[in-house]
Amino acid sequence: MNEEIDFIFDLIKEKMTNSISHLELEFTKIRAGRSNPSMLDGILVDYYGTKTLISQVGNIATPDPRTITVQPWEKDIINEIKNAINLSNIGLNAQDNGEMIIINIPALTEERRIQLVKQVKAETENARVAIRNSRKDGNDELKKIHKSGSISEDLLKDAETSIQKFTDQFIEKANKISSLKEEELMKV
């Protein structure tokens, strides 16, 4: 085809791939009743006046499927870590034994599972919208190139068809990831 069209295709694929990556990242934050160190991602601790990620001030482990432990490298900051976890909006209660922080993950109720499935569906829809926006951006760029006279009407239609195929593939991928997460959440 045309160099400009290939560039647009690459750009669109990259944006759509980023949308899928973001969806997967959001799904790691939605817990399915099992402990996962990534549940603490994004929680900041006041470490000597600097906001620092928990993973940078201690060792995070999952000794069993219902427990997360945080072993701080300095015992002086146990309370700061515990408070940061308790004040974060992840719905977990951190406790300490003087040496480390222990977080027990409660079993999910049916009501909570349904809420999480709704959250999964909302995140999936956000990803679909982002993918469709990427398609729209690509089509707009193609139309600009067509108006400038660089590509013919036939080439424009072929490129738009190709972009639609990319869109369909990435939306299907988002749907598959979503159904797997829903299945995981509803498994008792």
Image (tube, rainbow, N blue to C red):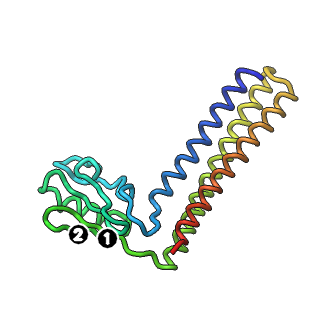
The three-letter amino acid code for the residue at tag 1 is Asn
Q: Quadrant of the N terminus?
A: top right
Quote the CA–CA distance across marks 2 and 1: 9 Å
Q: Residue furthest right?
A: 154
Query: Is residue 178 depicted above or below 12 in this figure?
Result: below
- Camera-near label (2 vs 1) is 1
Of the image marks 2 and 1, the number of the one nearer the N terminus: 2
Give the image location of residue 52, x and y in percent. 26, 48
Q: Residues within 10 Å of mark 1 (few under 14, many from 20)?
A: some
- For label 1, the SS is strand
Are the residues at dot 2 and dot 1 in contact (C-beta closer than 8 Å)? yes
The three-letter amino acid code for the residue at tag 2 is Gln
Work out whether residue 64 or residue 60 is closer to the camera in this orientation and state it: 64
Q: Which residue is mark 2?
A: 95
Image point (38%, 64%), residue name = 35
- For label 2, the SS is strand
Give the image location of residue 159, x and y in percent. 78, 32
Q: Which residue is mark 1?
A: 104
Quadrant of residue 11 in the image?
top right
